[in-house]
Image (cartoon, grey):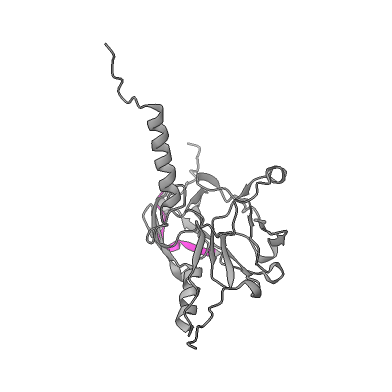
Amino acid sequence: MIASPQTSLAPERQTAAAEADRGLTYRPNVDVADCGSELVLVADIPGSVAEQIDVSFDDGVLAITATVRGRPQAGNPVRQEYGVGDYRRSFQIGEGFDGSQIAATYRNGVLTVRVPRLAAVRPRTIPVTAG
Amino acid sequence: MQMLRVGYAHPLEDLRDEMDRLWTTLTAAPPLHGWTRQTTSEPFPAVNIFETDEAILIEAELPGLEPADLELTAIDDELTLAGRRADPIEHAHAAEAAGATAEPHKLTWHRRERGTGAFERRLSLPTAVNPEGVVARLNSGVLTVTCPKAAACRPHKVTVSAS
């Protein structure tokens, strides 16, 4: 999809060097929506645990890193359609968001991150009264 | 005489086709029904299948599903995974909009890669399984299904006796 002009998300930074020294890392699929008062990011990170997920916000970059413990191979592989590994992805978040108030929850393999908009820049509707 | 080569296309036409494809990819709205990954048409969910002497083990990544959202059917050498994934953002927004007195803020999507809706995938297993004994677990979005092989398909040790 095309990013709208006011979008605050730039393509994620590639940290190839960092990825290379950590084995296989996957890029989670995400949904990102601007709900007005906050930016909501939903990422598919199956097989991790809350304690192993790191969400950081630094200099306008929201970074998600999740460690996934390799599942013991149960037998002879018959079909392999996906690999198991850590997840990593980062996003450039525009101005006007409050990095200190980010909340993240992990449930059923889905990480939800909420980045509230700074109160000063929330859209306001100004009522017009007849005078 | 100049021969017309079959399948020949001017390089610029190739470029135009490529641009058309790119444009379609960029502008295509995410599907409302069915399940696709953004750039691939791989079946969903992706599975890893393992085999031991006693059982066939299937692992699938199904983030965002509760056990109740999932329906598994096993018959003979076939396992069907079916279910539905809801959209948490849309759902929360709709709930908020329903309770709001003022006009709710419009939802602006920046990225939609996850896909929502119903899916069904039928898997052919390497051997027949005992449907009664199938055990499925969903943990942190990872489904693990253990299908014990049908008795006839298990390896049977043959004792060799001296004549």
Q: Nearer the viewer, residue A116 or B128?
A: A116
Left-right relation of B19 to A72: left
* Magenta span: B127-138
Q: Is residue A19 above or below residue A71?
A: above
Q: Is residue A97 above or below residue B22?
A: below
**Residue furthest out toward the top:** B1
Q: Residue at x 40, y 59 (%)?
A: B119
**Residue furthest out toward the bottom:** A131
Q: Nearer the viewer, residue A90 or A97?
A: A97
Quarter where residue A29 is shown? bottom right
Quarter where residue A6 is shown? bottom right
Q: Quadrant of the N terminus of chain B?
A: top left
Q: Residue at x 31, y 20 (%)?
A: B5
Left-right relation of B120 to A84: left
Q: Residue at x 48, y 77 (%)?
A: B104
Q: Residue at x 72, y 46 (%)?
A: A18
Where in the figure is residue B148, as x and y percent of width and height? 47, 56
Q: Nearer the viewer, residue A6 or B113?
A: A6
Where in the figure is residue B27, as x and y percent of width and height? 43, 52
In magenta segment, residue B131: yes
In magenta segment, residue A116: no
Where in the figure is residue A100, as x and y percent of width and height? 72, 69
Number of disc labels: 0
Left-right relation of A90 to B115: right
Q: Does residue B126 appear anywhere in the picture? A: no
**Residue furthest out toward the front:** A131
Q: Does residue B34 appear anywhere in the picture? A: yes
Where in the figure is residue B58, as x and y percent of width and height? 49, 54
Q: Is residue A104 above or below residue B46?
A: below
